[in-house]
Amino acid sequence: MFELGNKVSSDFVRDLSLNPDISRVPEIGLLYSELVQGIPPIFRHFIDNIKSVHSVLVFISFKSIPISKVAMEERFLFRQVEPRDYRMFRCVVRYGYNNVIEEPKEFERLLIDNLKEFIGHDHFIREGSVFLREQMEDQPAQRNNGSFRVSSASIQSLNNIVAVKSGNFSSRMVSGPIQGAEEEMQFVQKAMDNGVVYLLGETEVRAQQNSSLLKKIVVNYAYNFLRKNSRQGEKVMAIPRNRLLRVGMTYEI
């Protein structure tokens, strides 16, 4: 609830994208968070300490579903963070109680493949409709025997749209929205080839100084003891130590 109430605002991300002092690292950054809605406040702490952002950044949250298994095509739920050209994404990874979290390399492959598929689909939905509408406006419907028919140019525009599959860059480059989608997917693949870095925030939760004695005992000792002995992000994901970047932060509640 604390993270939800203090999540990073869209204005902060917009200002960040316009800040010339923030450099972009040509890799993919995976920031693990327990927050499934919005961007966690630890991200602002990362920026304050590192002064850089990976060229593709994915905020990842794991969510347990009370079913046996979550099918692979329903495992990764993506949402793009505005502004879109900054290439930041939210991802909720859903597992059933019989699903097993993959090894790092396999998890990264599945994540990136599904991200590229999301980019292709999202790009088509957003820009494909605009592209077709412009084509329809350029070639208006023509009346034929009391009815309307779509011009041949519009039909050709429909034929130019092809399905974009994840990991497949052999599709022919065509005019319209598909070319932009392919370029974005290639950008993500290139960033992955340069490396994947895991970002973890080591948060310490403390009761405020004016809190009651009971609250201090519950938060400072009982809660933190349970937290340290529960599953941690790097243990759950089996993150390689040489690709793990930590930043500490204290929450006062």
Image (tube, rainbow, N blue to C red):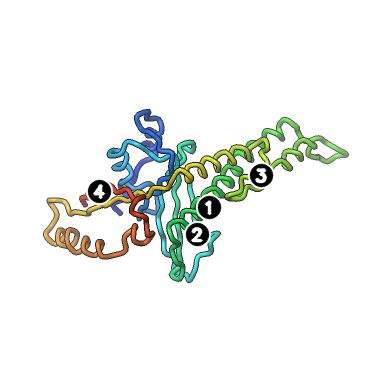
Q: CA distance from mark 3 to mark 1?
A: 17 Å
- Disc number for residue 248: 4
Q: What is the secondary structure assignment of the residue under circle 4?
A: strand
- Circle 3: residue type: Ser
Counting residues from the start of the chain, the first of labels 4 and 1 encountered is 1
Q: CA distance from mark 4 to mark 1?
A: 30 Å
- Circle 1: residue type: Asn
Name the residue beneath numbered marker 1: 114
Quadrant in which the N terminus appears: bottom left
Name the residue beneath numbered marker 2: 75
Relative depth, front residue between 141 and 250: 250
Q: Position of residue 175 (x, y in %)?
A: 67, 35
Q: What is the secondary structure assignment of the residue under circle 3?
A: loop
Counting residues from the start of the chain, the first of labels 3 and 1 encountered is 1
Counting residues from the start of the chain, the first of labels 2 and 1 encountered is 2
Q: CA distance from mark 4 to mark 2?
A: 30 Å
- Circle 2: residue type: Arg
Q: For the residue carrying disc 2, how many other residues have a C-alpha within 10 Å: few (<14), some (14-19), or many (20+)?
A: some
Q: Which mark is in front, 2 or 3?
A: 3
Q: Position of residue 178 (x, y in %)?
A: 63, 40
Q: Which mark is in front, 4 or 2?
A: 4
Q: For the residue carrying disc 3, how many other residues have a C-alpha within 10 Å: few (<14), some (14-19), or many (20+)?
A: few
Q: For the residue carrying disc 1, how many other residues have a C-alpha within 10 Å: few (<14), some (14-19), or many (20+)?
A: many
Which residue sits at x=24%, y=61%? 228
Q: Which mark is in front, 3 or 4?
A: 3
